[in-house]
Image (cartoon, helix red, strand yellow):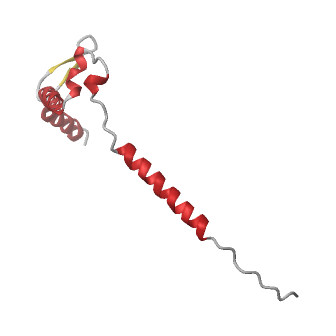
Amino acid sequence: MSNSYSAPQPVLWPLIVAVMGVFAIFLIIVNLAQTPVTPLSAAMNVPEDQQWRLSSTTRQERRAELEGEAAAAATSYGWVNKNDGIVRLPVDRAIELTLGEINAGR
């Protein structure tokens, strides 16, 4: 057995370089995240039927319009497919009919 002792190698400089590298990568990511994005309307020509997507106000108006259409469809009668005899019922009436069928089967 040998009693030779070797001093540990200094790891301070590689550690400092690694920390500085991680910090530099962090700064690059922060800089990229803060880069302003060009507005959608300036970036490309948007078709007329898609103009509502460009501002939050028009998106909110479009959402309200779609919710109104969905509410009207959920509370009214109408044909889904007249040839096949498929109709649209108000939700309350559909529940009543379904419960009637379930109770009739008991």
Along the line of sight, which residue is nearer the eye, 27 or 42? Answer: 27
Q: Is residue 83 left or right of residue 18?
A: left
For the N terminus, the image quarter is: bottom right
63 vs 44, left or right, is left
- The quadrant where residue 36 appears: top left
Q: Is residue 5 above or below residue 38?
A: below
Q: Residue at x 47, y 54 (%)?
A: 24
* Res 81 seen here: no
In the rendered image of this protein, does residue 3 appear above or below residue 25? below
Query: For the point 27% across and 15% down, which residue is it?
Result: 47
In terms of image quadrants, where is residue 106?
top left
Residue 55 position within the rendered picture, expressed as x and y whole percent measured from the top left: 19, 30
Residue in view at x 17 percent, y 37 percent: 95
Single out the residue that lies furthest toward the right: 1
Residue 96 visible, this angle: yes
Q: Residue furthest top?
A: 83
Closer to the camera, 16 or 78? 16
Position of residue 84 relative to residue 62, above or below, is above
Residue that extends furthest to the front in the rendered view of this protein? 13
In the image, what residue occupies the spot 22% across and 15% down?
48
Residue 60: where, in percent of width, then height?
Answer: 15, 32
